[in-house]
Amino acid sequence: MSETLFSKIINREIPADIVYEDNLVLAFRDIAPQAPVHILVIPKKPIPKLADAESQDHALMGHLLLTVKRVAEQEGLTNGYRVVINTGSDGGQTVDHLHLHILGGRSMTWPPG
Ligand code: AMP
């Protein structure tokens, strides 16, 4: 599997503002924030996109969502927040390593563009 920007962040080959880490996942601030709080939560396992997750990943997928909740609490997002997974080219995904966007600190609009 080819190395992506995010695997380089996991391996500390490029810097990132890391806000949470455990043995399975990493959370860091997005370099081009689209909201006052914009954090990416990624698995350390290099799953390219949601469509590539397999049944054996089910515990990891649950852990990613619970990490979103943990990080949102840590960031004080008590009024709510949005979680986004862009998947594939029509989904607007630009980095081929599964990531969950946490967007918060402002009111969101719907539908997204
Ligand atoms: P997506 O468009 O859903 O694939 O999201 C990729 C996200 O990665 C974008 O929001 C980018 O701003 C973000 N990004 C790209 N490079 C970096 C980086 N070096 N550190 C943090 N976030 C990044």
Image (cartoon, rainbow, N blue to C red):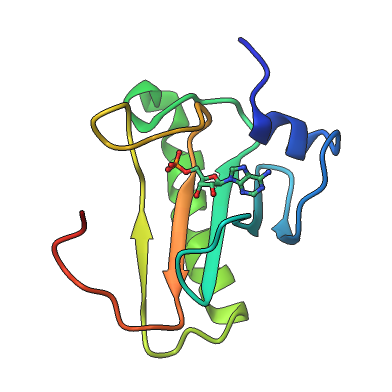
Q: From the top left corner, tell me how far across and down residue 31 is, in percent.
A: 63, 55
Q: Quadrant of the N terminus?
A: top right
Ligand 1 quarter of the rendering: top right
Q: Which residue is situated farthest in the right direction here?
A: 13
Q: Nearer the viewer, residue 90 or 54?
A: 90
Q: From the top left corner, tell me how far across and down residue 42 is, in percent.
A: 57, 44
Q: Which residue is situated farthest in the top direction here?
A: 1
Q: From the top left corner, tell me how far across and down residue 63 is, in percent.
A: 51, 51
Q: Quadrant of the C terminus?
A: bottom left
Q: Residue at x 36, y 26 (%)?
A: 55
Q: Nearer the viewer, residue 87 or 46?
A: 87
Q: Residue at x 46, y 63 (%)?
A: 102
Q: Is residue 20 above or below residue 61?
A: below
Q: Nearer the viewer, residue 13 or 61?
A: 13
Q: Residue at x 16, y 68 (%)?
A: 110
Q: Is residue 24 above or below residue 55?
A: below
Q: Which residue is situated farthest in the left direction here?
A: 111
